Image: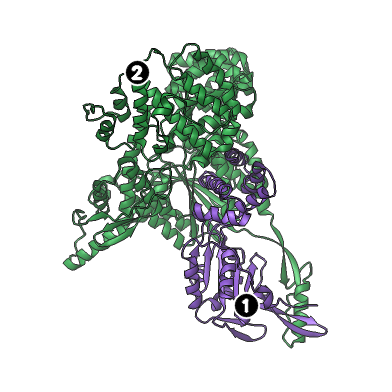
Chain colours: A purple, B green
């Protein structure tokens, strides 16, 4: 009845689509080889999680993703005792699972977790590479195949959500921002299964919205939003409508900004 | 009774306008005028006077002359709207225009009230501005003018659009006009890239005109023709044609929607048809295609014969050559008159564009030199230190002449990736002696602007930057305090960072904390009522941030049992481990525990609308903060020279927000200069004594740090930067909100990439500032 996650479930068997922007794969592979953990920075929807999937597939290692939130406790990461039929059973948390099986543990949006929780990764992230499991009185040594990866979005200006220097100074940091227009169009074309021309037009719209970042928009349209818009268009929804529901309405609640983005959409379609 | 009445009115009036500011007869006239009004009207008028007087005295006097008819036909609300209209005109176009607006009450205002003016540009400016910014990828200013047009930085559009009866289509007309003007800039309407004139004239087979030392290329070019006006009209036609084709490709949706617009203006051209004017046929041909949204083709005849549109993108001079050939074919024809171009084409502002270009070149030059010098400064300083060490000198260093630094281009030209634009040259590196220095994106952009403009990057710019970095052009002439007057009593002393010596000038600045006398007046009431919508909304939003209840598990006691914890404890117990005693859930109210200090620039440059917007923002912010419960303080700062930095207390951290604080906000007024270092250090000290989880120092400014003495340029920027670093080290988060248009050069150097907010439109400040605070603290 109660069973932990099984490591086999995390193995990625089919090659995920990933279009390289630069040297990120080479660098990540080198970091992996030398057992240095990875820190991915970049705006939302720019392909951080997809990159991790691709990397895991490339390395043939299971990928265990934890979406961080502010109630995430150390036990949620490391594991806990449970009772089964009058007996106690130890259940590995995702982090322990990854360490035990030499997988890749990916903590998504790490700044959302409380700072006291993130401290548990410190001994794993330096050259000790070990995970103390206090409850069991066990110290787990990570095999060479294990990798730790974090991601966060530095664009959020919140001062209460920032990574401690003691945490960040253990990583190789890769910045994954929006790809160049050509690459982005290629990605949108592939993922939304639309024509090149349609993809290019969506990318142009994205660039227009990103131009508003100085004028009150928190973030411009991400590659993910473009793919959503493309998918809706592909399923027969009228382009202006598709862009409105996927792009202008999701980007802002500010009346003037939404109206301005709608005008951009109606200029393009 | 009457005299008593006069007396109190006079008092009120002089409360707003000091008696000394008016002649006795002006004052009398004014009081006479007031006496004729009902008490309600008097109050209304006095309230509006208090709004206008601080903006401009002469405007206020002109206003007083014009109020009689307005008071006769407008009710209170309309009257306030009329005054807002006057102030908008004054702000945008100056006193003359504001006077015209006031005098011609019927045409300019009453018709708007009656809904006869169609869609006003002022009503849709914000949306259009945002739209254009996104589409063009750079900001354009929008201003009203008689005809559409652009000087490449500002786009002029008609004050109102009455073509259609509904607002949506009128907006579409605006959108089209604005997009087309942008497209004209994009297709290089003003030919700013022609560098080799002689070659151009050689291609034309014309003798090159005697070149005067200065003058505008296009003007000179057209003057060589037999019929300059005709040549210019043909050229403008071709460029408009090109811009429209560009829009068809770039913004197909807009061009499809605009069919209605083109159909509407078509009859106007047909009227010209009768007179057999030149270019009528061609315009009609283009317009017909636009009405059907067909891909544009050149009109048959002279145009199709002479034009090579395929090579226009590669070579801007081709279009001039083509225009010249058409002109030559037509110049001897029988038709004399040239058709009035359709409204959307707009006017050809050669001189304005040229002036704008010169101004931009000057600005780009300054910015580039300044930014580059800051970029290479560390390397230069290092080199100088080495030189000094090898000399074994302990003398304070004389600024280097800069002559022994060699700064050269190490440019690599990028391949032409894009098909359309001709130039895509980017300078990524620069060589300082043997060292390769990467240029950041801002510098690259500036470099490209200059290259686009001049065709190359003059070595002179590099030399100037090297000199500036070495400190020759910047040679501070520090006076001793004795020369400037002794330190004020009770002043705090602060160090100042000297980047050239990489050390502090100890106890260099004298800072004094001062009181502000709260002022009465109507500012607070007016501002509160003007922004009541925003305030209401913000209060609700801030309220939500405050009441953050949440259940916390694993407590020693609480309202309910924590099932997870209990199971875990039982399991632990069974496993032979000591079970936890933390088995309860408790509802906790999250303590935000944030302390914020708002530091407001009170330098003289904030005079006028900027200062007003800042004050309004503080008021809105304070109102919103009241529903949030974060501790906050507000201070202003200004000063002159290092011996007189002043900070003005508006609200202390623990002081309640009340009428006195409101009065002090109203009383904030522009003072002297912006020496930022001392106040930042002062409040770093103050904030670090406050117990809080997060401490914020939010600085509102309208420009660079600068003082009357030598506190300017990089010295000022580096000192401010250092003060901010000191603040960060003390665990304080500095954040900057700036209204400076040039801020992008230095602001990220000062505050770091994500720690500032750049405000385009100062009127948006009261809304943007609390939004920023919300994002920052949640």
Label 1 marks which chain's residue? Answer: A
In percent of width and height, residue B341 lies at: 46, 21
Q: Nearer the viewer, residue B256 or B584?
A: B256
Label 2 marks which chain's residue? Answer: B
Query: In the figure, is residue B237 to the left or right of B406?
Result: right
Label 1, label 2: how many angstroms apart (C-alpha)? Answer: 83 Å
> Which residue does the numbered mark 2 point to in the structure image?
B331
Asked where in the image residue B327 lies, by quadrant, the reply is top left
In percent of width and height, residue B212 lies at: 22, 28
* Quadrant housing the N terminus of chain B: top right
Q: Which mark is residue B758?
A: none
> Which residue does the numbered mark 1 point to in the structure image?
A98
Q: Is residue B30 visible?
A: no
In percent of width and height, residue A176 lies at: 51, 61
In what element is the residue under mark 1?
helix
How packed is label 1: few (under 14 Cα within 10 Å), some, or many (20 or more)? many
In what element is the residue under mark 2?
loop
Q: Is residue A182 visible?
A: yes
């Amino acid at each position: 009845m109660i069973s932990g996650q099984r490591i086999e479930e995390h193995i990625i068997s089919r090659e995920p689509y990933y279009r390289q922007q630069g040297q990120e794969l080479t660098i990540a592979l080198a970091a992996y080889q030398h057992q240095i953990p990875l820190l991915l920075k970049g705006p939302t929807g720019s392909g951080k999680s997809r990159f991790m999937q691709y990397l895991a597939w490339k390395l043939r290692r299971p990928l265990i993703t934890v979406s961080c939130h502010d109630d995430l406790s150390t036990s949620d990461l490391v594991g806990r005792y449970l009772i089964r039929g009058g007996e106690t059973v130890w259940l590995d948390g995702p982090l322990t699972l990854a360490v035990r099986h030499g997988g890749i543990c990916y903590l998504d949006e790490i700044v959302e977790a409380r700072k006291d929780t993130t401290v548990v990764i410190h001994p794993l992230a330096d050259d000790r590479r070990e995970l103390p499991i206090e409850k069991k009185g066990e110290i787990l040594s990570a095999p060479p195949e294990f990798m730790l990866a974090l991601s966060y979005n530095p664009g959020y200006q919140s001062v209460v959500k920032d990574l401690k220097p003691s945490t960040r100074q253990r990583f190789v940091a890769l910045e994954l921002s929006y790809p160049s227009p050509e690459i982005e169009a290629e990605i949108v074309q592939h993922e939304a299964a639309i024509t090149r021309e349609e993809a290019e037009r969506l990318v142009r719209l994205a660039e227009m919205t990103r131009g508003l970042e100085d004028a009150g928009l928190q973030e411009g349209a991400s590659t993910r939003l473009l793919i959503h818009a493309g998918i809706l268009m592909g399923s027969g929804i009228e382009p202006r409508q598709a862009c409105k529901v996927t792009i202008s309405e999701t980007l802002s609640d500010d009346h003037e900004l939404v109206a301005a983005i709608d005008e951009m959409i109606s200029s393009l379609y | 009774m009457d005299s008593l009445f006069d007396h109190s009115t006079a008092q009120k009036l002089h409360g707003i306008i000091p008696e000394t500011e008016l002649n006795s007869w002006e004052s009398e006239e004014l009081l006479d005028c007031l006496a004729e009004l009902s008490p309600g009207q008097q109050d209304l008028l006095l309230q509006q006077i208090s709004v206008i007087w601080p903006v401009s005295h002469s405007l206020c006097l002109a206003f007083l002359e014009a109020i009689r008819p307005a008071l006769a036909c407008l009710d209170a609300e309309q009257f306030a709207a009329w005054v807002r209209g006057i102030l908008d005109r004054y702000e945008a176009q100056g006193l003359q225009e504001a006077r015209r607006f006031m005098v011609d009450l019927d045409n300019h205002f009453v018709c708007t009230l009656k809904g006869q003016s169609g869609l006003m540009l002022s009503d849709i400016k914000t949306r259009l501005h945002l739209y254009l910014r996104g589409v063009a990828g750079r900001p354009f200013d929008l201003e009203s003018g008689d005809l559409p047009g652009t000087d490449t930085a500002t786009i002029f559009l008609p004050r109102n659009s009455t073509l259609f009866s509904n607002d949506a289509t009128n907006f579409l007309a605006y959108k089209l006009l604005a997009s087309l003007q942008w497209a004209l800039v994009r297709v290089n309407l003003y030919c700013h890239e022609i560098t080799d004139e002689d070659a151009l004239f050689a291609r034309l087979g014309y003798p090159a005109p005697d070149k005067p030392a200065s003058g505008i290329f296009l003007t000179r070019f057209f003057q060589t023709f037999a019929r300059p006006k005709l040549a210019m009209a043909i050229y403008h036609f071709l460029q408009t044609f090109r811009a429209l084709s560009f829009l068809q490709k770039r913004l197909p949706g807009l061009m499809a929607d605009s069919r209605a617009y083109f159909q509407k203006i078509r009859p106007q051209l047909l009227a010209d048809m009768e007179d057999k004017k030149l270019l009528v046929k061609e315009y009609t041909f283009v317009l017909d295609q636009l009405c059907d949204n067909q891909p544009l083709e050149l009109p048959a005849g002279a145009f199709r014969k002479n034009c090579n549109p395929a090579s226009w993108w590669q070579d801007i001079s081709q279009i001039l050559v083509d225009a010249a050939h058409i002109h030559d074919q037509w110049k001897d024809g029988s038709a004399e008159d040239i058709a009035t171009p359709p409204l959307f084409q707009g006017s050809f502002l050669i001189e304005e564009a040229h002036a704008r270009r010169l101004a931009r070149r000057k600005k780009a030059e300054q910015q580039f030199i300044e930014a580059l010098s800051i970029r290479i400064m560390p390397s230069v300083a290092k080199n100088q230190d080495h030189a000094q060490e090898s000399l074994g000198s302990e003398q304070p260093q004389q600024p280097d002449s800069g002559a022994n630094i060699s700064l050269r281009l190490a440019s690599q030209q990028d391949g032409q990736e894009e098909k359309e634009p001709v130039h895509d040259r980017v300078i990524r590196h620069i060589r300082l002696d043997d060292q390769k220095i990467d240029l950041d994106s801002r510098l690259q952009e500036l470099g490209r602007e200059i290259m686009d403009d001049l065709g190359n990057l003059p070595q002179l710019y590099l030399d100037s930057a090297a000199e500036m970095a070495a400190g020759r052009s910047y040679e501070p002439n520090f006076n001793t305090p004795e020369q400037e007057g002794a330190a004020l009593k009770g002043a705090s002393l602060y160090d100042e960072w000297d980047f050239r010596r990489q050390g502090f000038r100890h106890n260099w600045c004298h800072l004094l904390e001062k009181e502000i006398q709260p002022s009465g007046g109507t500012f607070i009431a007016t501002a509160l009522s003007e922004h009541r919508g925003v305030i209401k909304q913000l209060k609700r939003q801030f309220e939500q941030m405050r009441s953050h209840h949440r259940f916390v598990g694993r407590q020693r006691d609480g309202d309910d049992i924590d099932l997870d914890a209990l199971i875990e404890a039982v399991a632990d117990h069974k496993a032979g481990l000591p079970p936890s005693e933390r088995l309860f859930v408790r509802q906790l109210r999250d303590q935000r525990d944030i302390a914020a200090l708002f530091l407001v620039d009170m330098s003289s440059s904030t005079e006028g609308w900027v200062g007003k917007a800042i004050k309004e923002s503080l008021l809105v912010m304070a109102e919103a903060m009241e529903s949030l419960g974060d501790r906050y303080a507000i201070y202003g700062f200004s000063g002159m020279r290092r011996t007189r930095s002043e900070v003005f207390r508006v609200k202390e951290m623990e002081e309640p927000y009340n009428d006195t604080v409101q009065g002090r906000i109203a009383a904030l007024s522009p003072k002297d200069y912006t020496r930022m270092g001392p106040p930042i250090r002062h409040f770093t000290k103050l904030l670090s004594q406050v117990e809080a989880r997060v401490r914020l120092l939010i600085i509102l400014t309208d420009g660079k740090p600068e003082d009357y003495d030598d506190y300017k340029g990089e010295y000022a920027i580096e000192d401010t930067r250092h003060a901010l670093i000191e603040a960060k080290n003390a665990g304080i988060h500095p954040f900057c909100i700036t209204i400076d248009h040039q801020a992008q050069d230095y602001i990220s150097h000062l505050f770091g990439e994500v720690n500032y907010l750049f405000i385009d439109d100062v009127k948006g400040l009261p809304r943007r500032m609390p939004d920023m605070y919300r994002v920052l603290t949640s």
